[in-house]
Image (cartoon, helix red, strand yellow):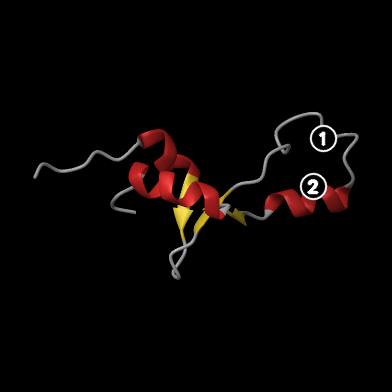
Amino acid sequence: MPKMKTNRAAAKRFKRTGTGKFMRARANKSHILTKKSPQRKRRLRQGTAVDAINVRALEHMLPYL
């Protein structure tokens, strides 16, 4: 069976934790930051886990991650 290709766009956006969860960055942190509170901007720095509904698709896109 041939090697599976990794989806490079997904590989740049998602990381896998030690326990096997996929982590992603939060949205709304790139521009128009003046109206957002400092507390909100701090919360947006942290990543968050990918929803369970999307995990199967990510496992197909990232077979070796």
Q: Does residue 17 sit above or below 6 in this rendering?
A: below
Residue displayed at 43% across by 39% down: 10
Q: CA distance from mark 2 to mark 1?
A: 8 Å
Residue contact between numbered discs 2 and 1, judged by CB atoms under 8 Å: yes
Point out which mark residue 33 bears.
Answer: 1
Q: Residue furthest front?
A: 53
Residue 47 vs residue 58: left or right?
A: right
Find residue 52 and report its image quarter: bottom right
Find residue 20 and report its image quarter: bottom left
Q: Could you say whether the residue bearing mark 2 is in a helix, strand or loop? A: helix
- In percent of width and height, residue 7 lies at 34, 36
Nearer to the camera, 27 or 4: 4
Q: What residue type is disc 2 on?
A: Lys
Q: What residue type is disc 1 on?
A: Leu
Q: According to the image, label 2 marks what residue? A: 41
User: How busy is the neighbourhood of tag 2: few (under 14 within 10 Å), some, or many (20 plus)?
Assistant: some
Nearer to the camera, 16 or 42: 16
- In percent of width and height, residue 62 lies at 35, 46
Q: Quadrant of the N terminus?
A: top left
